Image (cartoon, helix red, strand yellow):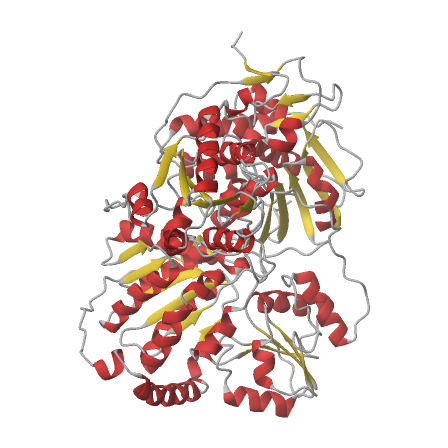
């Protein structure tokens, strides 16, 4: 099935988790595929541990913000944010969350959970939580599921963006690709 | 259907602020100045980056404050060059004096004043509308709806500025500045223009009598600009001859266009986008009011377009109360307004309100140590605070007031004068950052010295402008383009203000620093102002040199009795309560290893752990 060209993704976490980096990777992957991209970021005060929320809209949109019940996917780097941000999702929207297990607060949306914090510690790379969760979501997003359209991009698309961005620093690139792969290979916690 | 964009027109992803910078470079901007402020900060840094990439003949610099930035850039335009100044909306307040005067005098080279608004506000003292300031100043203002349009309107702004010899404001908001969009790649041409200042003191040094003539001229310019075709409003929907119309500008236009399409209202309601909210185009106003009997205006943050339409019977918006006057207009609120206006039923979902996660100083931030020590040295003081990362001293109970840039010192003086005749006046401790001190603190300190104000100023010198992204200060010695610059020494500056008691100490050497503060407090009670410069680099600043090796991983022993003293008074984000043991533990993913917490626990339960 061809990847859809119309997609709305919310990425949520707290300052310092690398929400903006993940948003950027997805946006660059979309541009590489010739899609129109609009995204929205929180800066400044949010970096000091406040909530960071990114909106990513791919396709024919003019507004940079996603309305409640319009998002296809919520990428939640901080599980406690789901209580508020699950409301962004369409009825058939799904969640990829950094958590030991899917909690009950996802408003009935299909949830795929991965303890990315624990995996990051195991990789001795505490900053890798964002890439681990992204890898996990890409793998889960590629799987067929009832009613749910596949993610617009796959692991290879993001690997390609990482090559372009981090090619000059091979050590960082290896770490990043490793984190992405670790997330993609991890089984879902149900 | 996928659009074959890349083959037709090479594009790249740009932040709104980067798009504005690109527009400035493409227009041949020769001098660009700024003071950092969210959401505008990246405009100047992106421009500096583009300068390095292209070798463009451009002087880009951070200035000490927005007034100075404005004056520097304005002189450039008086010399016939194209120039720009950028700031956030409250920074425009600081630049308001030269803005008002410059509007009367006019320009020679094009001059663009970029003032970025923060509806909400997300990180400002107000959510004021810079377009209203443009109206007060009597200059035109352009209101982009997206990064792509922001870049286009920079070019329009320069054309407009040079056609009428008037400064032009560009007013993006957070959702333009910090949105990312695919835009055309940079079309750079080296600029040809040479400086040529033509002496004309009647204009450039106009005295009050001639200002009257200049004002007359200014009014004529505005009347002509209200007929300028290139910036006229656009009609976005096909609806003809419908009684209802919606007028939008800025990001509200972007939201409305998408929502109108989704609701299928394009044939029933005319949608107009205003790109130049002031002065509102005369023909547009006449035609709008002639053609439609029911008009809704959606704009941020005040009813600037609505007030110029001036028809209370037919026009509704912010002024009439149809659109909320307070807070950012999110797209769901736009949808609500449009549905109601169109007579549609159906409830628009909104996000549940949950208690916000409060921002806090980074783990390892030297300000945390400073504020902890201030509470120890002066536990019952009045704490006047200021603007920067260190405002978050609030969380440690060590900031009582935050008004505006530089106010910590003047407010300390005010509190001193309020209490000085009382039998037991409180201690007063003001905190200000290094960049803020340069920006606005110096005149206030001079005043405090002259008046003999008995207070302690803790100058938090982390050698950077941190909250906005670690921009350099006058003490840094490096400019926006990475070039070496002269440095101004803070100690000399403080002494130059007349302060005789000034000491420098490292807040992270907590016990010694606390002693220094106690001694300064004692001095201030008897004698007058005492300054303690708390110097330790920001841990996010990539330029910093390490002062001391980190203490390494830290842990909390069983001696912890869960009293919560550290959580309440030190408030480090690395310290978390373990829900099972109800004791505090240190999260190794967050802890920076600064070791400042080692001495604070009443049970002495915090220690460096040695790797096993």
The residue that appears at 27% across and 71% down in the rendered structure is B77
For residue B579, say whether it is visible.
Answer: yes
- Image x and y of residue B82, in percent: 28, 69
The residue that appears at 75% across and 76% down in the rendered structure is B342
Q: Quadrant of the N terminus of chain B?
A: bottom right
Q: Is residue B552 left or right of residue B121?
A: left
- Image x and y of residue B190, in percent: 23, 61
Front-most of residues B249 and B431: B431
For residue B27, say whether it is visible.
Answer: no
Q: Quadrant of residue A103?
A: top right
B168 vs B499: above or below: below
- Image x and y of residue B297, in percent: 63, 76
Q: Residue furthest top?
A: B612
B292 vs B376: above or below: below
Q: Is residue B167 left or right of residue A117?
A: left
Front-most of residues B155 and B138: B138
Q: How many marks?
A: 0
The residue that appears at 39% across and 68% down in the rendered structure is B113
The residue that appears at 32% across and 80% down in the rendered structure is B105
Q: Quadrant of the C terminus of chain B?
A: top right
- Image x and y of residue B422, in percent: 58, 50
């Amino acid at each position: 099935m061809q990847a859809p060209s119309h997609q709305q993704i919310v990425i949520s976490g707290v300052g310092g988790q690398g929400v903006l980096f993940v948003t950027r990777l997805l946006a660059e992957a979309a541009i590489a595929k010739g899609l129109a991209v609009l995204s929205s970021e929180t800066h400044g005060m949010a970096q000091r541990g406040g909530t960071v929320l990114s909106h990513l809209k791919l396709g024919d949109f003019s507004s940079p913000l996603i309305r409640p019940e319009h998002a296809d996917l919520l990428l939640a780097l901080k599980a406690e944010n789901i209580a508020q941000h699950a409301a962004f999702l369409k009825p058939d929207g799904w969640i990829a969350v950094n958590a030991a297990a899917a909690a009950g607060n996802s408003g009935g949306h299909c949830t795929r959970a991965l303890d990315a914090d624990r995996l990051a510690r195991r990789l001795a790379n505490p900053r890798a939580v964002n890439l681990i969760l992204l890898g996990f979501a890409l793998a889960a997003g590629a799987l067929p599921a009832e009613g749910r359209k596949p993610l617009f991009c796959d692991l290879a698309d993001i690997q390609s963006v990482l090559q372009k961005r981090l090619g000059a620093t091979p050590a960082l690139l290896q770490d990043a690709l490793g984190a992405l792969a670790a997330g993609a290979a991890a089984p879902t916690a149900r | 259907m996928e659009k074959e964009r890349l083959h037709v027109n090479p594009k790249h992803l740009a932040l709104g602020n980067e798009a504005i910078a690109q527009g400035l470079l493409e227009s041949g901007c020769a001098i660009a100045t700024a003071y950092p402020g969210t959401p505008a900060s990246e405009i100047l840094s992106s421009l500096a980056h583009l300068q390095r990439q292209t070798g463009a003949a451009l002087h880009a610099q951070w200035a000490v404050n927005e007034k100075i930035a404005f004056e520097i850039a304005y002189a450039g335009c008086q010399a016939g060059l194209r120039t720009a100044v950028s700031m956030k909306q409250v920074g425009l307040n600081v630049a308001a004096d030269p803005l008002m005067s410059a509007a009367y005098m006019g320009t020679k080279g094009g001059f663009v004043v970029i003032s970025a608004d923060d509806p909400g506000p997300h990180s400002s003292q107000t959510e004021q509308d810079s377009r209203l300031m443009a109206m007060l100043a009597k200059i035109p203002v352009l209101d982009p709806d997206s990064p792509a349009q922001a870049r286009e309107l920079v070019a329009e702004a320069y054309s407009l500025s040079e056609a009428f010899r008037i400064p032009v404001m560009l007013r993006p908001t957070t959702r333009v500045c910090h949105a990312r969009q695919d835009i055309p790649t940079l079309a750079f041409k080296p600029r040809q223009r040479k400086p040529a200042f033509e002496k004309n003191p009647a204009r450039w040094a106009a005295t009050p009598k001639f200002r009257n003539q200049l004002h007359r001229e200014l009014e004529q310019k505005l009347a002509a600009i209200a007929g300028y075709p290139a910036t006229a409003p656009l009609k976005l929907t096909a609806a003809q001859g419908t009684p209802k119309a919606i007028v939008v500008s800025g990001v509200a236009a972007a939201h409305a266009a998408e929502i109108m399409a989704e609701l299928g209202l394009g044939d029933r309601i005319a949608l107009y986008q205003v790109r130049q909210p002031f002065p509102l185009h005369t023909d547009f106003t006449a035609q709008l009011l002639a053609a439609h009997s029911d008009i809704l205006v959606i704009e941020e943050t005040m009813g600037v377009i609505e007030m110029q339409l001036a028809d209370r019977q037919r026009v509704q918006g912010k002024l009439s109360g149809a659109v909320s006057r307070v807070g950012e207009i999110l797209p769901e609120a736009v949808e609500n307004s449009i549905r109601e206006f169109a007579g549609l039923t159906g409830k628009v979902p909104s996000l549940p309100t949950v208690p916000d996660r409060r921002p806090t100083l980074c783990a390892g931030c030297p300000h945390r140590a400073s504020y902890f020590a201030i509470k120890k040295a002066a536990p019952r003081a009045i704490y006047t605070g200021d603007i920067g990362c260190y405002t978050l001293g609030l969380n440690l109970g060590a900031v009582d007031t935050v008004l505006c840039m530089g106010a910590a010192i003047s407010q300390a003086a005010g509190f001193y004068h309020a209490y000085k005749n009382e039998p037991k006046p409180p201690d007063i401790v003001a905190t200000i950052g290094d960049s803020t001190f340069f920006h606005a603190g110096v005149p206030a300190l001079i005043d405090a010295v002259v008046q003999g104000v008995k207070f302690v100023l803790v100058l938090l010198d982390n050698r950077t402008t941190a909250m906005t992204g670690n921009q350099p200060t006058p003490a840094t010695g490096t400019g926006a383009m990475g070039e070496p610059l002269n440095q101004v020494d803070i100690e000399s500056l403080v002494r130059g203000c007349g302060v005789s008691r000034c000491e420098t100490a490292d807040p992270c050497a907590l016990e010694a620093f606390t002693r220094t503060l106690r001694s300064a407090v004692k001095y201030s009670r008897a004698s007058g102002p005492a300054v303690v410069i708390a110097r330790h680099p920001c841990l996010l600043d990539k330029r910093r040199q390490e002062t001391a090796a980190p203490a390494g991983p830290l842990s909390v022993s069983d001696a912890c009795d869960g009293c919560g003293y550290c959580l309440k008074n030190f408030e480090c984000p690395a310290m978390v309560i373990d829900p099972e043991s109800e004791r505090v533990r240190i999260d190794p993913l967050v802890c920076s290893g600064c070791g400042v917490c080692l001495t604070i626990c009443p049970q002495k339960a915090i220690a460096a752990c040695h790797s096993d």
